[in-house]
Amino acid sequence: MTTVSGLPAYSEFVSNPEAAPPRPLRRWPFVLTIVLGALLVLAPVGTGMFPRAVKGEAMIDAFEPYMTRSSIDGYRHDLQVLDDARTNVSTLQQRGQQPGSYPRVDQFVRDYPEIRYHMSGMIGAIDDNRPNYEKLAAVPPFGTLPWLLALPGAILVGAGVLGFRRAQQGKQALVWRSAAALAALGLIAVPLLGGLFPASPAAQPLINDLGPILTHDEVRKLQGYFVTLVAADGELNSRYTADVRSAHPDADLTGIATLETRWQPMTSRFAALIGAMNDNVRNFDAVVALNDSTRPLGFGAFRGLGFCYLVPGIFALAAAVEGIWLPGRVPAKRVVLRPNPVGGARK
């Protein structure tokens, strides 16, 4: 056999194959995740949602005792008692059974129709909006709503940044995709489980109907009415009834007597309602401002509240699961040629 010398062997020319540097994976899902997360963090800040939502929650809690069927029926019964007392006094005046002048009682007879009109309108507006109030009261506490946007948003930003780095290194970033997916599922769950969609149409009519009532001017007017009623009752109780009975023992004082028996619980209820209205004027203004914060976009904030969670949640979930189930990429092999400095021979 002939021996060929002076030629390098193949194994001396070619080394073992080495893995090429991994190619970066797709990074746009993480960019989308970062953008969505940033928007979710900035939205409640830009709309003033943090302080305004807390004030909205305080208002809802404050009005809870006055939005029940029994409470509203009680106020209507109280107005009927006042109606009957005024009618009683008017009848005595018409029959000439009122001895002398009683300026506070006369003012009550004169002003009560206006008092009745405004107070019955207020109670009617509250009654008409009981279903709307109940829908809003059933959602998660208003004070938590901005946090339920911002906290998932912060998680999405963090997962997006760290996932982007892993993808740039050619790695799947399953941990950060999973974190983003969980945050996205939380966003989707808030409107679906929290009742935001059925509650969102209830906010605007409630704002429209309570807007004329929950103002400082209206509260001052109601306080003035209350002063008139207190003064009239004081005069009825201290002078009027005794004088009428003394001059006309057979006079009918049924309406006035019923007012006296109902006066203490009645005034307590009306004072509590007026006090709650006075304490919540600024809270109501904050709720209106929050609702109007999205008007430049063409809708009220409460109308679109459910979609503010659902839509980013769907997109974030799609971005998070993109590529999770794709098979991993096999790193490409490369052949490194290394000349052997020392010649060898092969048979």
Image: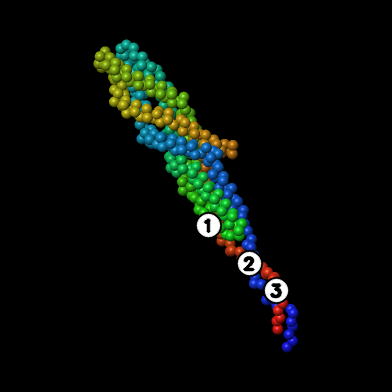
**Residue at 36%, 14% in the rendered image:** 103
* Quadrant housing residue 113: top left
Going by the image, does 143 lie left or right of 295? left
Going by the image, does 87 lie left or right of 157? left
Residue 303 visible in the picture? no
Q: Which of marks 1 and 3 is nearer the N terminus?
A: 1
Q: Please tell me whether mark 1 sits on a helix, a strand or a loop.
A: helix
Question: What colour scheme governs how the chains and residues are painted in the rendered image of this protein?
Answer: rainbow
Q: Mark 1 points at which residue?
A: 175
Q: Residue 343 or 270: which is nearer the viewer?
A: 343
Q: Earlier in the sequence, mark 1 or mark 2?
A: 2
What is the CA distance from the residue labelled 1 to the residue labelled 2?
A: 25 Å
Residue 39 rendering spot, x and y as whole percentages: 57, 45
Q: Please tell me whether mark 2 sits on a helix, a strand or a loop.
A: strand
**Callout 2, which amino acid?**
Ala
**Callout 3, which amino acid?**
Asn
What is the CA distance from the residue labelled 3 to the residue labelled 2?
A: 22 Å
Q: Quadrant of the C terminus?
A: bottom right
Whether pointer 3 and pointer 2 mark residues with C-beta atoms closer than 8 Å, the reply is no
Q: Mark 3 points at which residue?
A: 340
User: In the rendered image of this protein, does residue 111 appear above or below residue 47?
Assistant: above
Q: Earlier in the sequence, mark 3 or mark 2?
A: 2
Q: Residue 341 or 286: which is nearer the viewer?
A: 341
Q: Classify 10 Å Cα crowding around label 1: few (below 14), some (14-19), many (20 and above).
A: few
**Callout 1, which amino acid?**
Val
Q: Quadrant of the N terminus?
A: bottom right
Question: Residue 71 — which label?
Answer: none
Q: Classify 10 Å Cα crowding around label 3: few (below 14), some (14-19), many (20 and above).
A: some
Q: Please identify the residue farthest to the front as the structure is shown.
A: 342
Question: Residue 19 — which label?
Answer: 2
What is the CA distance from the residue labelled 1 to the residue labelled 3?
A: 46 Å
